[in-house]
Amino acid sequence: RRSEGRRQLFVVPYTGRWIPPENWIAIGDGTALDREAKWSPDGRRIYFLSDREGFRCIWARNLDPKTKRPLGSIYPVVHLHESRLSLMHIPNTGNVSICPVGDKLIFAIGELTGNIWMTDLSQK
């Protein structure tokens, strides 16, 4: 579900038939811009991007292995609160491509750098 500056993630059981929204399992509370969710390899957590602190970071929520209902609170996995290395440098969040592999998390990140060059312009 979307509203301005917010997006909410849900888990919906697959039955081959339409599941009404009241049976969807909310991952967040709908107050943040959460998106690009990916399952952990063992299916026990969901990783996602969120701008909930004013920065785009990677967050997660643990889930009950059988029911997929949330266990505990949403928690940060990777904080990226600096201007040099930031997910904000990748305008299309789909290109971040969170990829959980074993005990690793692979993702694209933007890097912003600059150089200052000095020279002596005096004529000899």
Image (spheres, grey):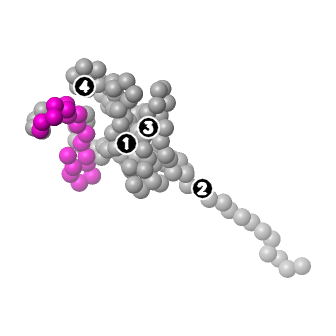
The residue indicated by pointer 4 is 68
The residues tagged by marks 4 and 1 sit, at their Cα atoms, a distance apart of: 19 Å
The answer to whether residue 29 is above or below residue 95 is above
Q: Amino acid at mark 1?
A: Leu
Q: Position of residue 79 (x, y in %)?
A: 45, 38
Q: Amino acid at mark 2?
A: Thr
Q: Position of residue 51 (x, y in %)?
A: 35, 46
The residue indicated by pointer 1 is 49
Callout 3: SS: strand
Say whether residue 63 is visible: yes
The residues tagged by marks 1 and 3 sit, at their Cα atoms, a distance apart of: 12 Å
Q: Dividing the picture into quarters, in which one does residue 22 lie?
A: top left
Question: Which residue is the extreme one toward the right?
Answer: 124
Q: Amino acid at mark 4?
A: Lys
Q: Dividing the picture into quarters, in which one does residue 120 lie?
A: bottom right
Of badges 2 and 4, nearer the viewer stands 4
Q: Dividing the picture into quarters, in which one does residue 45 lie?
A: top left
Callout 2: SS: loop
Say whether residue 75 is visible: no
Callout 4: SS: loop
The residue indicated by pointer 2 is 113
Residue range corresponding to the magenta coloring? 1-19
**In this view of the protein, which residue sits in the foreground, 39 or 17?**
17
**Total residue callouts:** 4
Q: Can residue 51 be found in the magenta stretch?
A: no
The residue indicated by pointer 3 is 99
